[in-house]
Amino acid sequence: MERRLRAARLATFAYFALNGFLMGMWIVHVPDVEQRAGIGHAVLGWLLLLLGAGAFAGMQLVGPLTDRLGARRVVPASAALCSASVVLPGLATDVWTLGAALLVFGVGNGCLDVAMNAHAVQVEHGYRRPVMSAFHAVFSLGGVLASLAGARTLSLDWSPAATLGTVALAGVAVSVLAASALLPRETDEAAGRAQPGERTGSRTRHRTPGRIWVLAALALMVMLSEGVANDWSTLHLRHSLDASAAASALAFGAFATAMTAGRLLADRVAGRFGPVAVLRYGALVAALGLSAAALSPWIPLAVTGWAVFGAGLSGCVPQLFSAAGHFDQGAAGANVSRVAGLGYLGMLAGPAVIGPLTGIMPLHLTFFLPVALCLVAALAAGSLRNERVPAPGPAPTCHPEAA
């Protein structure tokens, strides 16, 4: 059992890294795909909504499916779909084919996102200690690897179709090879039976519990704040502080680096102080960091503020996903899909909300909207407490800390 659990954890790392790598390779090739399709930035912006819509639909579809069939079946199929569909944008030649390609790729990404997080909850339940944040850190590292690989293939003048086609084949291979290490369906069912009196399984659950919607709302707030950093941190230094292009890029770099590092450490913090503390104090730190960045007249202090913002946010989303999955082991997929789906909408809404606000106030003042949302998340952190989760038992004898 100990060896199987360790193998399942490594396989989950592989799927998270693959997801981050696939998304990163798409992002790296956006300019070339846009040029090949013969569209402008405005049209691309609208088409990206199809990517988001497809992802949201995939999340809602695959959540109950994971509960019914088990993550061991759904994760590899979702990973193969996401991998195979990444080549489609590279083959698009006009607005219609690109729109269809992004919709399908979005569905694959949404399916993989929820399925792999549901399996991560299953692995965490076996370890009896927090391990979720590390998976999300590996997702970020997959994106970093994609940026390096994409830069190399672009320097060699590879076409988007050739690069993304190669990535698709490699991704499908990883999807198949890692599948055998995933935990079997029986583990889910045993976890569900461990909570007497609960109705587990998607077939018997007709409505989502209120606490899951609270967690979903918190995910929306936190991921909206993260979306603001992704799209506006560089522009903030460029337009509000008149920084150079190189210096402006440091804002997002500092944010992303701090978030990745924070996720590598968040599991140990959550194990010692609990997930409520991670969300509460992480959100407070994030609010402090973004406030400093927004009010700073100096570029170094602003960059530091964005780094603190990323460090504070780093452990928040994994705790919310974990809490949703552990709330009811028999409906982990459906519950994670609600939290991930609403959170994903927040990620998309963040940049869209800030844009119109800049018409009535300076850009740096608009950042106090995510500051306020972080404060709300800190106040509501107690929602992570779940008395229905079994008390942690003895750690596996394989000493998974070394895994």
Image (cartoon, rainbow, N blue to C red):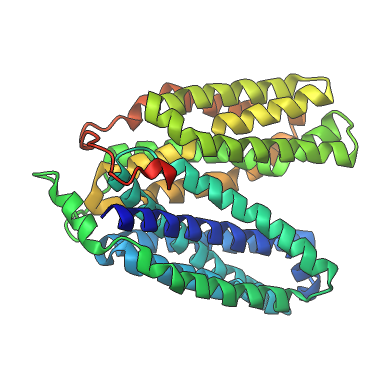
- Out of 126 and 400, give the one closest to the viewer: 400
Could you say which quadrant of the image residue 212 lies in? top left
Left/right placement of residue 25 relative to residue 55 reads right
Residue furthest out toward the left: 197
Left/right placement of residue 15 relative to residue 90 reads left
Q: Residue at x 74, y 19 (%)?
A: 295
Looking at the image, how many numbered discs can be counted on the residues? Answer: 0
Q: Does residue 367 appear anywhere in the picture?
A: no
- Out of 366 and 137, give the one closest to the viewer: 137
Image spot of residue 326 (x, y percent): 29, 43
Image spot of residue 239 (x, y percent): 85, 34
Left/right placement of residue 12 relative to residue 159 reads left
Q: Residue at x 52, y 34 (%)?
A: 265
Could you say which quadrant of the image residue 211 lies in? top left
Q: Does residue 155 appear anywhere in the picture?
A: yes
Could you say which quadrant of the image residue 395 lies in? top left
Image spot of residue 206 (x, y percent): 21, 54
- Out of 398 and 95, give the one closest to the viewer: 398
Image spot of residue 149 (x, y percent): 72, 63
Residue 87, above or below 324: below
Left/right placement of residue 137 relative to residue 202 reads right
Q: Quarter of the image containing the N terminus? A: bottom left
Q: Residue at x 87, y 41 (%)?
A: 246
Residue 158, above or below 144: below
